[in-house]
Image (cartoon, coloured by chain):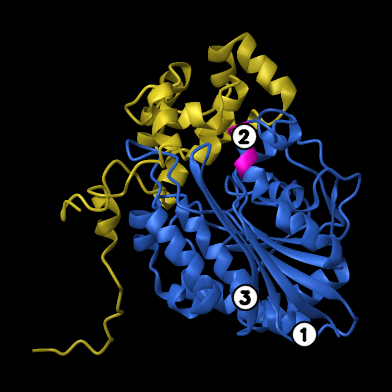
Chain colours: A yellow, B blue
Amino acid sequence: MQQDKTMPRTRLYSLDELDDIPGTKVFRARESRQAYHLHKFCMSLMKAENREAFKADERAYLDQYAMSEEQKQAVLARNLTKLIELGGNMYFLVKIASTDGWSAQKAVSSMSGMSAEEYAQMMLAGGRSPEGLRSIRNKN
Amino acid sequence: MARISGGIATSHVPAIGAAFDLGKTEEDYWKPIFEGYKYVKEWIKDNTPDVVILIYNDHASSLMLDIVPTFAMGFAEEFESADEGWGRRPVPVVKNHLDLAAHVAEQLVIDEFDLTLINEMDVDHGCTVPLSLVFGKVEEWPCKVIPIAVNVTQFPTPSGERCWKLGEAIRNAVKTFPEDLNVQVWGTGGMSHQLQGTRAGLINEEFDRRFLELLAHEPEELKYITRLEYLREAGTEGIELIMWLIMRAAMGYGVEEKHRFYRVPASNTAVGHVVYETKS
């Protein structure tokens, strides 16, 4: 048998492990590219005049960006869960929430499956425990 | 010669900045958080540095869209507060110390850190909230600030070990700067939090408190926490804690912990804060 002369590179864990965290999507290079135009739209909201233009006609404003139709629909519906699924990252997406005058907590709570009030109460009580939410496979 | 005299670590939650700007610091929700910063506001009066090297992350305000640098240094004369979607924070312009920044930037590359230099950028809450928490409402920041931005947003972030080595390299760079300057290094971000998905709102107090304890006494133990462990234990945004390791490594071995504070919650986040002095 031909021996492989290259040394195997050691890794502490397989990157598949990143998909093993319950209720979590890790933002990586592919997502970053998938959401590039969505994120470009989000960052445009860092100017007051653009926020006004977006609020005046959301659809027309979004049509200036080369986002997918699915991404546009999810922005119009303020569906952050869907936007994360479509490659989005919260640091960009929160600019939509800020434009709407939502607090970051309200925006984040909209993905949690809880009402904004329930979520706020959970945070006051110490937040969501990591127990059982570390690994899908190990159920811990 | 320049010397590093102290270090501060603090969370940089944007809602804390909003509470500060809107005069809500005495409200029931915010008061216990601002109480945690009373010590540092007094301490800094006697320990105002010439320059702060401020380690933070850009939250898709100036970086992360077109360019995703692992380690970047702001290299303009000054930096304005970014408009993150609700207007610019009403805080002073952040002014750089270009001579020290140039020296550190050159030394870091010579030391194998391929630093990206950013000639024009705004700084967001990651940089300005810590300045407000420490210096309060001021007309001008009382020191120069060299902002160093770390990618903690897009996986893979730099490892804990890499951040530790960067802190050591910053220490060496400062020590070889010929001018007599009092320099502090601040690490910002964290503690545990997650801002996405059905696991949003995750807080791991046990992890955070252990981190604070080890950071003071056995900081090198923290170098080996993997990215995956941060994600699992401290949440997707809890990985910001790697920036505290840069500060800690820049302090050298002997530090005196002057203050430690921990509080849950501020918005979605566990707030942590420490003040260290280096032993001369």
Residue pointed to by mark 3? B167
Q: Which residues are magenta?
A: B28-32
Nearest to N terminus: mark 1 or mark 3: 3
Q: Main secondary structure of the magenta part?
A: loop
Q: Is residue B113 above or below residue B280?
A: above
Q: Is residue B178 left or right of residue A113?
A: right
**Residues beneath discs 2 and 3 located on the same chain:** no
Name the residue rendered at 50%, 51% in the picture. Answer: B153
Residue pointed to by mark 2? A43
Residue pointed to by mark 1? B175
The quarter of the displayed image where residue B18 is located:
top right
Q: SS of the residue at dot 3? A: helix
Amino acid type at circle 2 is: Met
Q: Is residue B98 left or right of residue A107?
A: right
Q: Is residue B278 left or right of residue B213?
A: right
Q: Chain of mark 3?
A: B
Amino acid type at circle 1 is: Lys
**Is residue B13 one of those drawn in magenta?**
no
Local crowd at mark 2 within 10 Å, few (<14), some, or many (≥20)? many
Q: Is residue B170 above or below residue B118?
A: below
Q: Is residue B251 above or below residue B98?
A: below
Local crowd at mark 3 within 10 Å, few (<14), some, or many (≥20)? many
> Residue A80, image x and y in percent?
42, 28
> Residue B173, image x and y in percent?
74, 81
Amino acid type at circle 3 is: Gly
